[in-house]
Amino acid sequence: MNDSQIIAADFTRQPRTAIATNKDRSRLFLFVGDGRQPRYSNGFTRADVGNILRALGATDGMLCDEGGSSCMFLQSTDSIVNTPSDNQGRERPTYTHFGITLN
């Protein structure tokens, strides 16, 4: 990527997935934001995600995905709790995921 492509990428609105913690690591934040779905969700810029997580108290974080595989499944509802932009709103087969278990 050249410099102009990197700068342009910082302002594009996309589906996003991010993970973050607060300063003392007592809280874990998981962010999944839908996008690329007219009349439903335009998506988020990288700065949008950072600002949202910061407002919630996050201090350290990482963007994980910027596309149609952004998806969150909760065992408590036994369902996907967002609307992915690919595959008619259904989960897309992908090789990366976070699995979190609370004891």
Image: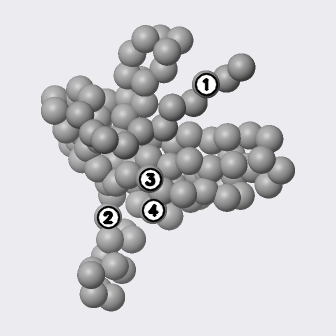
Q: Residue at x 32, y 64 (%)?
A: 12
- Label 2 or label 3, whichever lies nearer to me, is 3
Report the residue marked by disc 4. Answer: 46
Query: How far from the left and from the top, in percent, is residue 46?
Result: 45, 62
Q: CA distance from mark 2 to mark 3?
A: 16 Å
Q: Are marks 1 and 2 in contact (CB under 8 Å)?
A: no
Q: Earlier in the sequence, mark 2 or mark 3?
A: 2
Report the residue marked by disc 3. Answer: 64
Q: Earlier in the sequence, mark 1 or mark 4?
A: 4
Crowding near the residue tagged with mark 1, few <14, some 14–19, many ≥20 C-alpha atoms within 10 Å: few
Crowding near the residue tagged with mark 2, few <14, some 14–19, many ≥20 C-alpha atoms within 10 Å: some
Query: How far from the left and from the top, in percent, is residue 29?
Result: 63, 41
- Label 3 or label 1, whichever lies nearer to me, is 1
Q: CA distance from mark 1 to mark 2?
A: 33 Å
Crowding near the residue tagged with mark 4, few <14, some 14–19, many ≥20 C-alpha atoms within 10 Å: some
In the figure, is residue 58 to the left or right of 13? right
What kind of residue is marked 2? Answer: Thr
Q: Considering the image in quadrants, where does the C terminus appear? A: top right
- Label 1 or label 4, whichever lies nearer to me, is 1
In the figure, is residue 70 to the left or right of 52? left
Residue 50 visible in rendering = yes
Query: How far from the left and from the top, in percent, is residue 72?
Result: 42, 30
Residue 101: which disc?
1
Q: Considering only vertical position in the picture, is 80 above or below 45?
A: above
Q: Earlier in the sequence, mark 3 or mark 1?
A: 3
Pick the residue in front: 15 or 24: 24
Q: CA distance from mark 2 to mark 4?
A: 8 Å
- Label 3 or label 4, whichever lies nearer to me, is 3
Give the quadrant of residue 102. top right
Pick the residue in front: 57 or 92: 92
Report the residue marked by disc 2. Answer: 12
What kind of residue is marked 3? Answer: Cys
